[in-house]
Amino acid sequence: CHANDLNPISFQYLQKNAKLNKCFQGRLEMYNLDGREFIHNMNHKGLEIDHFIMNLPAMAPEFLDAFRGWNFKIKSYPDGSTLQQRPIVHLHCFGEKAKCSDEVARVETQVLRRCETALGCPGCLSSEEKREKNDVRIRVVRDVGPRKNMLCVSFILPVEVAKVKKIVLTKTNENGKRERGEENVPKSQKLKISILN
């Protein structure tokens, strides 16, 4: 398993909890990175990843842009067959509360289009065909207000993201200046992500 938290204090508790729960080196790898950097590192290392859990509901959908240009691994089997490994993403976000059952589809489509925009693949999750192909599921986690729910959107990472230009992360240098990349990522957008495999 791999776990990440940008907040240094949360990272200390992650380490402390791992020790208390006897999750030793080799069973749990812990990182103190920006969420986008973490996702890029997991793909760059070529790890076999089953699940990404993105649990910051206010901003998690916007961090899906880190999956652009994803390098899908091909798994080979003894019988000569192959399978493209596609991780499942579990994303927490806020969404409008449907007032009646007729509005559920509209609300779900709004949330999925927000995810598609960040992935850079319009239509990769919201169409009927893609919802089935990518095993898209949306559930209400909890009621957070009179007009808002916290939702969990789960889907198999669409193959279309491989063809989208990968974002280049920017970092602050020693002089406090941001180094430029193909796309600047706002400093305010930081995310905690966990990976289970």
Image (tube, rainbow, N blue to C red):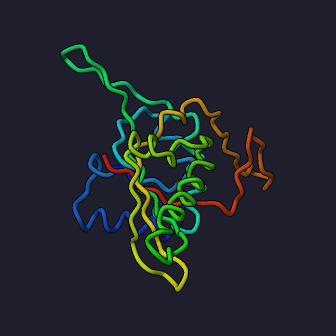
Q: How many marks?
A: 0
* Residue 171 located left or right of residue 119: right
Quadrant of the image occupied by residue 30: bottom left
Residue 2, compared with residue 100, is above or below; it is: above
Camera-nearest residue between 191 and 177: 191
Residue at 74% over, 38% down: 182
Camera-nearest residue between 53 and 10: 53
Extreme residue in the top direction: 80
Residue 29, compared with residue 86, is above or below; it is: below
Q: Position of residue 141 (x, y in %)?
A: 39, 71
Extreme residue in the bottom direction: 146
Q: Position of residue 56 (x, y in %)?
A: 51, 66
Residue at 45% over, 67% down: 151
Residue 5, compared with residue 81, is above or below; it is: below
Residue at 39% over, 39% down: 133
Q: Position of residue 149 (x, y in %)?
A: 48, 75
Residue 139, compared with residue 159, is above or below; it is: below
Say which quadrant the C terminus sits in: top left
Quadrant of the image occupied by residue 183: top right
Residue at 50% over, 45% down: 127
Camera-nearest residue between 77 and 20: 77
Q: Position of residue 51 (x, y in %)?
A: 36, 48
